[in-house]
Image: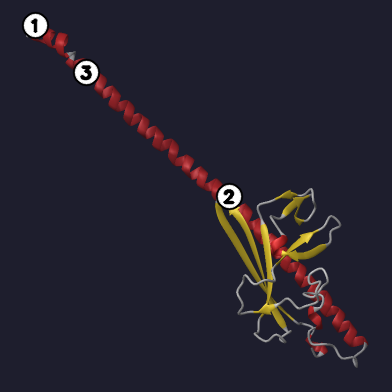
Amino acid sequence: MRFIKLLINRFGGNIDGNKERGLTLVETLVAISILTIAVVGPLGIIAQALHTSYYTRDQMTAYYLAQEAIEYVRNLRDNQSIAITKSFLDNPDVPILPGSWLNGVLYTPDFNPSGIPQITPLNTPDNDAFRYSLVRSDAGVYSFVPYNSMDYMKFKNGIYGTDAADGSPTQFQREIFFKRTGNSPNDNQDFVMVVNIYWKNGSTPAKLTLREYFTNWASKTGL
């Protein structure tokens, strides 16, 4: 019997040794598999958390950029309405044109140099010709510019939307257009402002849209 074992060990290898080495290899593979699962799982969770965090950060920035444009137009509307109300109180016998509350909102020279009202009916496509962006100069003056002339918004001194030549380009684009809530070209009592912010979340395009309805709250003047 001992002679047979010696022959097996000589020509076939050590049976007991092979079994021992085989078990060690399997154990190593199992350990590596468990370690891989233990490492890859948390790394995937961390990567997803970072992706969500970056998206949330950019989404908040996009929301504030859209809200800024709306607040700017709301300020124009309010100042114009206050001026109309004061004019009416000072001169109640002087007639006021029905659409005069829009003069400081949509017909400002920097917005519409041609003097043609560029506010379209609500049922026209969103990609109509009258699209704008809002930029801020170094002097702190805001103005509308044609959207097609805008590339990505710039960033300077902590402010987005600057048109400064030395501003740093960002990943955000701001598109603005205005529509009448009614289909009549002479319906000057209200309009809707739509602001789209475009950016990329990694390589995936993202978009945020805000809408705001503006009405003529200087109605006590008879407009």
In the rendered image, which quarter contains the N terminus?
Answer: top left
Q: Crowdedness of circle 3 by 10 Å Cα count: few (<14), some, many (20+)?
A: few
Residue drawn at point x = 13 percent, y = 7 percent = 6
Q: Which residue is farthest right?
A: 90
Mark 3 and mark 2: Cα distance apart in space: 52 Å
Question: Residue at (82%, 79%) from the top-left corner?
Answer: 81
Q: Answer above or below: position of 99 versus 151.
A: below
Closest to the observer, 175 or 211: 175
Residue 181 x, y percent position in the rendering: 66, 81
In the rendered structure, which amino acid carries the disc numbered 2? Ser
Q: Earlier in the sequence, mark 3 or mark 2?
A: 3
Q: Is residue 169 above or below residue 85?
A: above
Which residue is identified by label 3? Answer: 18
Q: Which mark is residue 53?
A: 2
Residue at 82% in and 57% down: 137
Name the colouring of the figure: secondary structure
Q: Which mark is residue 3?
A: 1
Q: Residues within 10 Å of mark 1 (few under 14, many from 20)?
A: few
Q: Which mark is residue 55?
A: none
Element class at badge 1: helix
Q: Is residue 12 above or below residue 138?
A: above
